[in-house]
Image (spheres, rainbow, N blue to C red):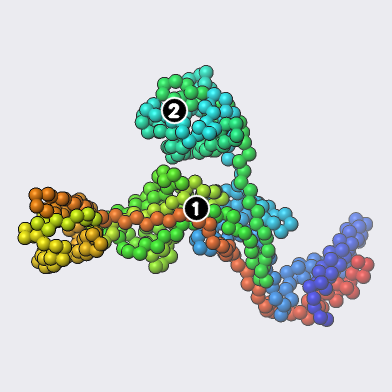
Amino acid sequence: MVLTQKKINDAILKAECCLASKTIKYFNQLSYGKDDMNLFKCINVLDIAIETLCKFEIVGSTSECPCTIEGTFLIEGLNQLIQFNNDGTGYVNNQAFIWYIDNSVVHVIFPNQQCYQTSGDGIPELGTECASYTWDNLAIEIYIGNPGDPLSRTLIYDAGFDEIHNTEELIADFNQNNTVGAQIELNCTEECCYYFFTNLPTNLGNQIIFFYGFHTLGASPLESQDCGENYTFNYTCDENGNLILNNFNDFLTYIASLNITSPPFTDTNITLSILDNNDVLQDTVTVSSNDTPEEIVNQFNEDNTLNLVMQYNAPNNYQVYSPLFNGYAGYTFFTWNQVEAPFTALFNITSWGNTSQALEFTDSNNIVYTFSNPGGGDETTFMLLLEAWLETQPFEMTVVFNENVMTFSTNDPLFSGTQPSSVQLTLIEGIEETSYDSPFTTNVVYETTFESAETLNLINQEECTPETIEQTCLSNKQIGDIINYINKTCTDC
C-alpha cells in the first residue's frame, strides 16, 4: 500500500464509526447477559488503532509548519518583542491590545482609554485666538469634580505663578506635570476649540474645572469619546509557515538617527533632549561622557518619560524610535549636546590697529596668559610673533587668521569650558582702542528630526523549520496493515 495522509484520515473516520457501532452492540448484548469477549477485544484493538493512526506521521514525508499569528515576534531593528496570545490578546511596549483575523487581515486594537472631551461650555472659545490667548502672572489650576461642591473637587494640576504664558505652553506643562497621568490637547473646528483629555480617572467626578488666578474660569462636563486605536496588517505566510505581516510600519511612526562624529570630552555630561515643533523642551536625559554606548542607550531608555526607545549601531550611530502605536508629529527634534574638543574662540575683526596689539588668554583656572606686541605692525607680523609666543606656553593652541576672522583652537583641558575660559584681543590705532572678547566654545549640539521609519520586519521567535519524518516505532507498512485490518473489520462503515 502507498501510504497517504488521506488514507490514514479515512481509516480513522471508519474506525471511529465502527468503534461506536460495536460498543453499542457489546453493551446491548451485555444487558441480556451475553459477554462477547471477541467483540470486547475488537473494541479495544480499534481504540488503540485510532490513537496510533492519529499520532502517526508518514515516514519520509515532510512536516508542515502551522501558519499562525499566535506567538512571540521580535521587531527587527528595534529589539522589542510583540506577543500575540491564543486568546486574542497581545502585548507590546508596555501596552496591551486585542487582535483578530478577518480574510487574511490582522486587526490589532488598543482598547479605549478613559477618554473625554469638554463640551466647550464655560471654557474660553479659543478658536483662532488659540495661539495668542495668554495666561500671564496668575496661577492656573485644574480640578475634577463637582463645581458646586469644593469638598468633592480633586486638584490634578497647578501651574503656580509666572510659569504659563499661552495656551500651547499650558497644554505642554499640563501633560508633563499633572498628578494623574492625563493628557490634554485641543481639537479645533471652525466654530471653536475643545479640550480633549485622555487617561482621566473616572472615580474623581464627571466635570473638569478651570481656575484662572483665584476665580473660577469655568467648568465643563466631560463627554465620553471613542479613543480606541485600530491598526490592520496584511497576513501571509512564507513557504515554511512563518508569519509575514505586511505594512507593519504603521505601528511605528517616526525614527531619529544621529551620527556622533567626535568623542565627548571625558568627565562631562551629555544632554539628550526632545523638543516639539515649537522648540519647547519635552524631556531631557543626562548621561556621562564616560559611559559606553550601551550604557548611554540603557540609561536613556530607562529615564526618558516619553516611551522612546534608543538603540546603538556601530560606529557612532544612535537611533531613537517614537512610541509604538502613537503618532509623533508633535515631537520633531532630537538633540545631543556634549562637551567636545577642539575648543574654539574666534573674532571677526572689522578694523586692524597697527600701533600695538595685545592678547590675554584666561584658562578654566582663571590664570591669565598675556601676549603683547607694543611695536605694532600689520596682521602678518602679528601672526608670526604670536605663533612663536604660543610655542613657549604651557598649553597647545593653534591660531588661524583668514578673511578678517581670527580663530583659536585647542584640545588642552585648561580651556575645556567646564569652567569659564576665554581670550581677549586689544588693538590700538593711535589713541583709539578696540577690544574683542570671546569664550572658548565647548558645547557641540548634534540635532536631527524624526522621520518615517524604514521597513521593519517581524521575526518569529518560535520559528518552525519543516523536517523529514524519520521512523520511530512503526513503519509505513505496519500502518498499512492497521488500515487493512480496519477495512476488513469495519465493513458496515
Q: Can you name the residue that lies furthest to the front here?
A: 430
- Amino acid on which the number 1 mark rests in the picture: Ser
Give the left or right position of residue 26, taking residue 477 as reference: right
Q: Quadrant of residue 469?
A: bottom right
Q: Looking at the picture, does residue 422 appear above or below residue 37? A: above
Among the 4 quarters of the image, the one containing residue 493: bottom right
Local packing at callout 1 (Cα closer than 10 Å; few below 14, some 14-19, many 20+) is many
The x, y position of residue 36, in whole percent, is 89, 65
Q: How much space separates mark 1 and mark 2, taking CA atoms?
A: 31 Å
In the rendered structure, which disc, 1 or 2, sits on the residue that comes first in sequence? 2
Question: Hey, which quadrant is residue 155 in on the image?
Answer: top left
Q: Position of residue 45 (x, y in %)?
A: 81, 69
Task: Using the image, tell me which numbered label, if any, was put on residue 322.
Answer: 1
Report the disc number at residue 15: none
Residue 300 placed where, x, y %?
Answer: 40, 53
**Residue under numbered circle 2:** 141
Report if the CB atoms under discs 1 and 2 are less than 8 Å apart: no
User: In the shown orientation, is residue 84 left or right of residue 442?
Assistant: right
Residue 66 is left or right of residue 5, and the answer is: left
Question: Residue 125 or 209: which is nearer the viewer?
Answer: 125
**Disc 2 on helix, strand or loop?**
strand
Q: Amino acid at mark 2?
A: Glu
Residue placed at 37% from the left, 28% from the top? 137
Q: Residues within 10 Å of mark 2 (few under 14, many from 20)?
A: many
- Can residue 14 be seen by looking at this rendering? yes
* Residue at 54% in and 24% down: 122
Q: Which residue is at the front of the view, 206 or 120? A: 120
